[in-house]
Amino acid sequence: MKVCIVGASGKLGQYMVQHCLDRGYQVTGVCRPKSAAKLDRFGDRITVVPGFTDDREVIQRAVAGCDGVLAVLVPWGVHGYASGTARAVLEGSEPDCRLVFSCGWHITKDGKDTYSKSFLVMVAVFGWIARLTRLVDIKDQVAACRTIFCSPKKWTVVRGSDLEEGESQGLPVWSRHVGDPVLASNLTRRVDFALFMVEALTNDALIHEAPAIVGCQAPSAVAHQ
Ligand SMILES: NC(=O)c1ccc[n+]([C@@H]2O[C@H](COP(=O)([O-])OP(=O)(O)OC[C@H]3O[C@@H](n4cnc5c(N)ncnc54)[C@H](OP(=O)(O)O)[C@@H]3O)[C@@H](O)[C@H]2O)c1
């Protein structure tokens, strides 16, 4: 399997590279030119395409001939970075390519998620500060996901809970809607978020789904599985 990881140099991206290599996949990673050195530890086991993830030419070159694309969606700045990345991946990838995007619980596909008051306040306050400082534009990640949800291509949008570092605990459990009791613990190991993304490449049941995930050993997952 030939896989492109868009945003390979970040924390989630590097875990995804490792999971893909563990499976014997052929890996191409896209990352900002200044971050390419973060991928040095993988040596010649991966091909690195330096460039911005919303650059259509860069993405088209990187995803050509790939069976799967794993894309880290992060709305950096206020110039549509996440939506530009989503469009570049949707338009540049092969018609049958499996596309898996990452985002957080705040994204809703069908409006049936139910959020706690504290979660909504946190998103509102973070969104306001981020926009004010022009560092991040959460609304652009929402726009990116809307574009993906309207696409006929074979996409999955994986919605991560709060994250922590640590050894893998195994494949996270998922639910269609935030608010389901199984997700209540709201915590996943980052390495397992990456594992879920990579496993989604070969799980056709996740096509056109936006699974919200939680660690499989989180108390709510153990109690409700
Ligand atoms: N962090 C959380 O608690 C959390 C919770 C739920 C879901 N998620 C989701 O998880 C994904 C990434 O999480 P992460 O914690 O692994 O993030 P991360 O390590 O910070 O990686 C984010 C990506 O953004 C890039 N990046 C950083 N600064 C940038 C800039 N100024 N301009 C352009 N690109 C920049 C990084 O590339 P460089 O290597 O070039 O810096 C990397 O590819 C996102 O989809 C996010 O929505 C995160």
Image: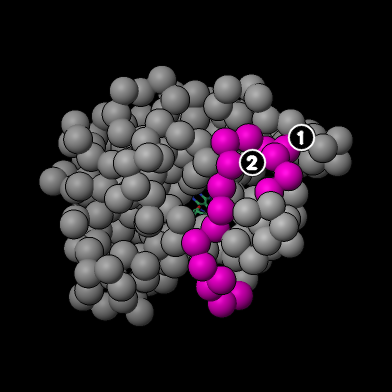
Q: Point out residue 24 in the picture as x, y percentages from the top left corner.
A: 22, 69
Residue 105 badge: 2
Q: Residue at left 49%, top 30%? A: 145
Q: Residue at left 46%, top 56%? A: 196
Amino acid marked by disc 1: Tyr
Looking at the image, residue 28 lies above or below residue 114:
below
Q: Where is mark 1, residue-wise? A: 115
Nearer to me, 222 or 60: 222
Confirm whether the magenta stretch covers residue 175: yes
Q: Point out residue 201 in the picture as x, y percentages from the top left corner.
A: 32, 49
Distance from mark 2 CB to nearest ligand 1 atom below 8 Å: yes
Amino acid marked by disc 2: Trp
Proximity of marks 1 and 2: CB atoms separated by less than 8 Å: yes
Confirm whether the magenta stretch covers residue 182: yes
Q: Point out residue 149 in the picture as x, y percentages from the top left corner.
A: 44, 25
Q: Considering the image in quadrants, where does the C terminus appear? A: bottom right
Quadrant of residue 164 within the rendered picture: bottom right
Looking at the image, residue 76 lies above or below residue 12:
above
- Give whichever of discs 1 and 2 has the lower sequence position: 2
**Residue 186 in view in this figure:** no
Q: Secondary structure at mark 1?
A: loop
